[in-house]
Image (tube, rainbow, N blue to C red):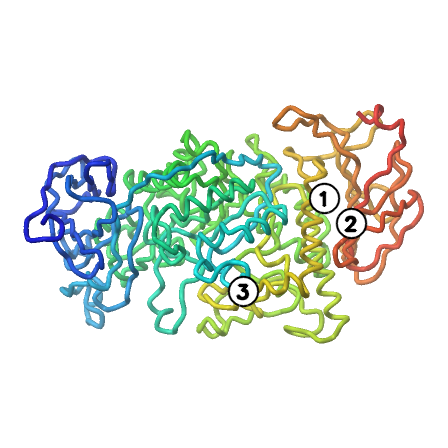
């Protein structure tokens, strides 16, 4: 019986495109790129994945693609490859047919990698290191690829297509978000199915976010040294397949689970953004395992050291760097992106260490091959693209230098806002520029204010609660003697390191959390918040919890009805305030050059005296209190549907001083007074609603953020417009 019995499976020539294993309704076409291989064998396995039932040499070799068609193969078939060629590390070749290899284009994986010395192409412990050769077969302990049937009924699914200016991003972990959720059935916790349950969808929709950004969901490996310590690669920045979802996030292993999650999030009006890792793979440096790319065509897939191809260029800090200057590697990444958009219907991507993707042989180039390919691609034209604009290579810090169409993580926003509220001197000019959208970084080539993705916390670093509870990192659980993780956190514990029983300290911390989040959602640009910050999630001072797949990182949902209830209400109020006021999310940069007909500028900064700040006042390094006026009547803005995006006049007052500051609310044309609509002194942020008259000092408590809306004279409307 073919595929499982003694008879040989029928093999036809097949086609060199598309790459991967493709079910066409009649059989399966297998195609694998390797420019330097001498022979490629397709290995078929029984349903358990433990027994290799047949080994088939792919019969055709066209344009550096090895291919064959199996008319008797069906979806569900498990397979892998053995690739023959020279084992010559000095010249960049590491072929070893004793190692079963994953298909780079596999749409699904089965099982996991059980670590053993047999996964290495060389003999571990040999004095010749990777110049030696290992003949052990690793197939039984290796993950397998699975042929998939892509059919799925999407029904009335529609992409939310949220405009960039209206976007609110929520960064979450696909597993950790639901592992402790009491309303998610236990079998579904930690999975894509768990994320699509009614309880989770209702929560996300009620919060008001417009996009969920999931940490890597591409299939990834656990570092061997972590498994020895009983730890796991929790974050997932160790990709081994760019088309297959991570099996541990699935209850069934069937692709429909991921697609169902996307469809239900879309129905709730929420976009799905994937954090993707195309800069390196989980195979490590020259002493790493042989799992896929290394054994298929090491010299093509990786950037190797000029003059000594035994070693890898490492612009990622992970041991290797994918070679996107090779046309077939570039094709793989582009095919992967298009697949996740067309077949899986995701709405965008956040690119890890994106500077790597723009590197040519001479360094980063905003007109490099990958960035140009993305820019002209019609499939990617309608999705959100976000760069983490740095890597560890030379000239790796490129914030503001990505091409039009890209948004970028803005770490200068993060650091300046943290330092301002911590009370550092001389921060006002810097933080003002960041709150106004960072035009100094992004205003070029027609880029918009949304290009700056503003954040105070992210998965990499302290949570918001830890940011105001710890002065130092506490990463001892990671097993690296607290050497890992950032040391420059710009944090403060306000008197006690870690949890505090003192009510005064706790009150200060709660206020500072509200101040930081208020600044985030009141800033021009695209806000991104870390999941769990809205309920006070803590990682006990661990600012690099990449290997902590446990209750340290899993969100504690009991806080929603306890200590975190007030904070949750506050965040909901903030997001609702941002949505209600278009002036908080203008698509263009505001410079005070545009005014309404009554002469009031679109943006202006005020000193506590009630007058616009002077150049001399900006130079005062001791100043920590400021007012930001945003005039929603200045300029003409239209929504996507053509309706008017006119707004009122807002005044945002920020006081990072420890002590109260008398602040005179400005007297502006057409205004009768100012009504407070947000107050960070209050747990849920609700302003008292009283009207404050302009021209008189108003006491602003220390460490407080306030938002006022101008109460306009009845006759002002026509004049202002």
Q: Horizontal and vertical percent for residue 445?
A: 55, 31
Q: Which residue corresponds to the image point at 42% horizontal and 48% vertical from the top-left? A: 276
Q: Quadrant of the C terminus?
A: top right
* Number of the label disc, if any, that sits on residue 577: 1
* Number of the label disc, if any, that sits on residue 536: none
What's the distance in space between the residues labelled 1 and 2, CA to CA?
A: 9 Å
Q: Horizontal and vertical percent for residue 281?
A: 34, 54
The one nearer the camera, 115 or 476, is 115
* Number of the label disc, if any, that sits on residue 543: 3
| C-beta proximity under 8 Å, tags 1 and 2 | yes
Q: Going from the N terminus, do you reach mark 3 or mark 2 first?
A: 3
| Of marks 3 and 2, the one in the foreground | 2
The one nearer the camera, 460 or 67, is 67
Q: Going from the N terminus, do you reach mark 1 or mark 2 first?
A: 1
The one nearer the camera, 223 or 85, is 223
Mark 1 surroundings: few (<14), some (14-19) or many (≥20) residues within 10 A: some
* Number of the label disc, if any, that sits on residue 678: 2
Q: Is residue 563 above or below residue 144?
A: below
Q: Is residue 161 above or below residue 308?
A: above
Q: Which type of secondary structure does the marked residue at label 1 adopt?
A: helix
Mark 2 surroundings: few (<14), some (14-19) or many (≥20) residues within 10 A: many
Q: Horizontal and vertical percent for residue 670?
A: 88, 32
| Of marks 1 and 3, the one in the foreground | 1
């Amino acid at each position: 019986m073919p595929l499982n019995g003694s008879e040989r499976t029928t093999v036809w020539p097949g086609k060199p495109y598309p790459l991967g294993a493709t079910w066409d309704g009649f059989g399966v076409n297998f195609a694998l790129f390797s420019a330097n291989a001498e022979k490629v064998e397709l290995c078929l396995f029984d349903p358990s994945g433990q027994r290799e039932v047949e080994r088939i040499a792919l019969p055709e070799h066209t344009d550096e693609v090895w291919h064959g068609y199996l008319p008797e193969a069906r979806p569900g078939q498990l397979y892998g490859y053995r690739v023959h060629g020279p084992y010559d590390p000095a010249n960049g070749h590491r072929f070893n047919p004793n190692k079963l290899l994953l298909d780079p284009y596999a749409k699904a994986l089965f099982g996991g990698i059980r670590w053993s010395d047999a996964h290495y192409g060389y003999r571990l412990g040999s004095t010749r290191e990777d110049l030696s050769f290992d003949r052990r077969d690793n197939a039984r302990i290796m993950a397998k690829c699975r042929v998939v049937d892509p059919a799925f009924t999407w029904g009335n699914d529609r992409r939310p297509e949220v405009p960039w200016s209206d976007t609110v991003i929520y960064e979450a972990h696909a597993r950790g978000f639901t592992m402790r959720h009491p309303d998610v059935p236990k079998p579904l916790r930690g999975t894509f199915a768990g994320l699509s349950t009614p309880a989770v969808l209702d929560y996300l929709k009620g919060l008001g976010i417009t996009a969920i950004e999931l940490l890597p969901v591409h299939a990834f490996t656990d570092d061997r040294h972590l498994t020895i310590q009983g730890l796991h690669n929790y974050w997932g920045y160790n990709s081994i397949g760019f088309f297959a979802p991570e099996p541990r996030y699935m209850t069934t292993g069937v692709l429909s689970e991921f697609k169902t999650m996307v469809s239900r999030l879309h129905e709730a009006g929420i976009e799905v953004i994937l954090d993707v890792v195309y800069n390196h793979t989980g195979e490590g440096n020259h002493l790493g395992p042989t799992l896929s790319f290394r054994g298929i065509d090491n010299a093509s897939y990786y950037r190797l050291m000029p003059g000594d191809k035994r070693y890898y260029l490492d612009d990622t800090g992970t041991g290797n760097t994918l070679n996107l200057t090779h046309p077939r590697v570039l094709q793989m990444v582009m095919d992967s992106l298009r697949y996740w958009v067309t077949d899986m219907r995701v709405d965008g991507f956040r690119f890890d260490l994106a500077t790597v993707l723009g590197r040519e042989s001479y360094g980063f180039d905003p007109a490099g091959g990958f960035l140009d390919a993305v820019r002209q691609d019609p499939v990617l034209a309608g999705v959100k693209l976000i760069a983490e604009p740095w890597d560890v290579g030379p000239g790796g810090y490129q914030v503001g230098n990505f091409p039009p169409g890209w948004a970028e993580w803005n770490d200068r926003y993060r650091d300046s806002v943290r330092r301002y509220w911590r009370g550092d001197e001389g921060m006002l000019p810097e933080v003002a520029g960041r709150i106004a959208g960072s035009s100094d970084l992004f205003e070029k080539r027609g880029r918009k204010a949304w290009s700056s993705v503003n954040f105070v916390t992210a998965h990499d670093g302290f949570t918001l609660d830890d940011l105001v509870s710890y002065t130092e990192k506490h990463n001892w659980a990671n097993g690296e003697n607290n050497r890992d993780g950032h040391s420059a956190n710009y944090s403060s514990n306000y008197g006690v390191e870690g949890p505090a029983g003192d009510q005064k300290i706790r009150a200060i911390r709660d206020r500072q959390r509200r101040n930081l989040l208020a600044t985030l959602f009141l800033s021009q640009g695209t806000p991104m918040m870390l999941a769990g910050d809205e309920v006070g999630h803590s990682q006990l001072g661990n600012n690099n919890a990449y290997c902590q797949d446990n209750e340290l990182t899993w969100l504690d949902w009991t806080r929603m009805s306890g200590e975190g209830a007030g904070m949750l209400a506050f965040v909901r109020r903030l997001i609702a305030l941002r949505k209600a006021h278009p002036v908080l999310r203008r698509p263009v940069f505001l410079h005070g050059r545009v005014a309404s007909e009554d002469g009031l500028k679109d943006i202006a900064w005020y000193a506590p005296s009630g007058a616009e700040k002077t150049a001399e006042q900006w130079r005062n390094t001791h100043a920590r209190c400021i007012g930001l006026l945003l005039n929603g009547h200045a300029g003409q803005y239209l929504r996507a549907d053509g309706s008017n995006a006119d707004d009122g006049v807002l005044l945002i007052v920020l006081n990072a001083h420890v002590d109260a500051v008398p602040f005179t609310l400005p007297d502006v044309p057409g205004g009768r007074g100012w009504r407070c609509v947000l107050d960070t002194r209050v747990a849920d942020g609700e302003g008292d609603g009283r009207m404050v008259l302009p021209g008189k000092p108003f006491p602003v408590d220390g460490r407080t953020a306030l938002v006022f809306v101008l109460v306009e004279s009845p006759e002002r409307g026509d004049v202002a417009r």
